[in-house]
Image (cartoon, grey):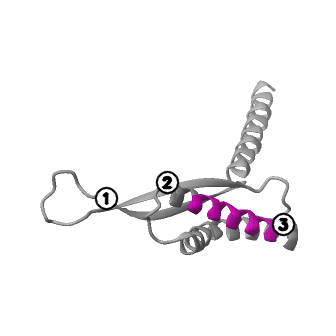
Amino acid sequence: MRTFTFLVAAAIGVSAAAVVSTGAVAQTLGEVTVQATRNVSTKLVGSTSSGIPIKEVSLSYGVSTAGLDLATVAGAEELDKRINDAALAACKEVGRQYPKSTPGDAECTEAAAKKAMVTAHELVHAANKASIK
């Protein structure tokens, strides 16, 4: 009888751990990272005539999926809007801090949003798959 009780307790413990870890994964997947990247030309102090090095700067914003039902068209469109808004804000901020950086706001925003949309599409696909069950 003790063995049976122990096995039941162990099974309950494993089930609880699975539920908790699934919740942690779901929370992790509830955010999309938008990273704006630009190139900045800077001169080396004391350098020879070897040229100007290029330094890359970036700024990342997290976009939450909180309150969105990604299994609906409206939810997916709102996530798309949030990502584009975050990409524009990040690119403008990098541009403000580094006015001579390239590319410009429009190209930076497009590239940042495009990279983030990969994760967004995965989240929408997972939500649609889960809603079918």
Nearest the viewer among 13 and 66 is 66
Q: Quadrant of residue 3?
A: top right
Residue at disc 2, secondary structure: helix
Label 2 crowd (10 A; few <14 / some 14-19 / many >=20) = few
* Label drawn at residue 97: 2
Does residue 19 sit above or below 54 in this rendering? above
Left/right of residue 75 with respect to residue 18 in the rendered view: right
Q: CA distance from mark 1 to mark 2?
A: 14 Å
Which of the marked residues, 1 or 2, is nearer the chain's N terminus? 1
Nearest the viewer among 53 and 19 is 53
Which of the marked residues, 1 or 3, is nearer the chain's N terminus? 1
Q: Quadrant of residue 20?
A: top right
Left/right of residue 115 with respect to residue 22 in the rendered view: left
Left/right of residue 40 with respect to residue 28 in the rendered view: left
The amino acid type of the residue labelled 1 equals Thr
Residue farthest top in this picture: 2
Contact flag, marks 3 and 2 (Cβ < 8 Å) = no
Residue identifier under label 1: 42
**Region of the chain picked out in magenta, as a range:** 76-92
Q: CA distance from mark 1 to mark 3?
A: 42 Å
In percent of width and height, residue 117 lies at 65, 70
